[in-house]
């Protein structure tokens, strides 16, 4: 029998599933029996019980999934929009000078192209402000 994939459940459904598991555990069921009843892996039940024992039931609440917006970015939103406009306004053959086909084969070439793009971006921003 296939186990339920928690990634497909909404945060509310996942919270309810965890609450059921903790309630059954408090009634004296072991983690394998709980796992069979709820159609989840017994290690998940064990992990939920351990978290509940150490940090309390509130620690089992689902948090928002994924990265926070804007993390791990190298460019600001303004810079991204400017680059998007530069790319959208040009035909593919005009982009060849900014992104040469063979320029991304190694790290040095990639860095050179990004430095060049950064310089062009700064130049365009300077002239647009002036």
Image: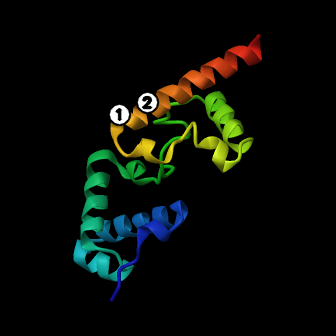
**Left or right: 130 in relation to 110:** right
Residue 76 pos. (x, y %): 58, 28
Determine the residue positioned at 36% across, 69% down. 21
Q: Nearer the viewer, residue 82 or 7?
A: 82
Q: Are marks 2 and 1 in contact (CB under 8 Å)?
A: yes
For the N terminus, which image quadrant? bottom left
| Left or right: 82, with 76 as reference point | right
Q: Quadrant of residue 34?
A: bottom left
Q: Nearer the viewer, residue 95 or 66?
A: 95
Question: Alpha carbon of mark 2 to alpha carbon of mark 1: how far?
Answer: 6 Å
**What residue is at 45 percent from the left and 53 percent from the top?**
61
Count of labels in the image: 2
Q: Is residue 80 above or below residue 91?
A: above
Q: Residue at x 51, y 41 (%)?
A: 68
Considering only vertical position in the picture, is 123 above or below 5? above
Image x and y of residue 53, in percent? 27, 52
Quarter-of-image position of residue 123: top right
User: Residue beneath label 1, please?
Assistant: 108
Crowding near the residue tagged with mark 1, few <14, some 14–19, many ≥20 C-alpha atoms within 10 Å: few
Q: Residue at x 65, y 47 (%)?
A: 93
Q: Which residue is mark 2?
A: 112
Q: Secondary structure at mark 1?
A: helix
Q: Residues within 10 Å of mark 2 (few under 14, many from 20)?
A: few
Q: Which image quarter is the C terminus in?
A: top right
- Viewer-proximal residue, 21 or 11? 11
Find the residue positioned furthest to the bottom: 1
């Amino acid at each position: 029998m296939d186990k339920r994939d928690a990634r497909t459940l909404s945060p509310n459904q996942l919270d309810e599933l965890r609450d059921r598991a903790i309630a059954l555990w408090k009634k004296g069921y072991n983690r394998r029996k709980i796992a069979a009843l709820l159609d989840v892996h017994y290690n998940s039940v064990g992990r939920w019980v351990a978290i509940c024992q150490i940090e309390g039931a509130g620690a089992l609440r689902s948090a928002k999934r994924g990265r926070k917006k804007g993390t791990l970015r190298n460019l600001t939103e303004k810079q991204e929009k400017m680059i998007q406009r530069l790319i959208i306004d040009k035909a593919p053959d005009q982009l060849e000078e900014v992104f040469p086909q063979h320029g991304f084969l190694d790290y040095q070439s990639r860095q050179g192209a990004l430095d060049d793009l950064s310089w062009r971006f700064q130049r365009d921003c300077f002239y647009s402000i002036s």
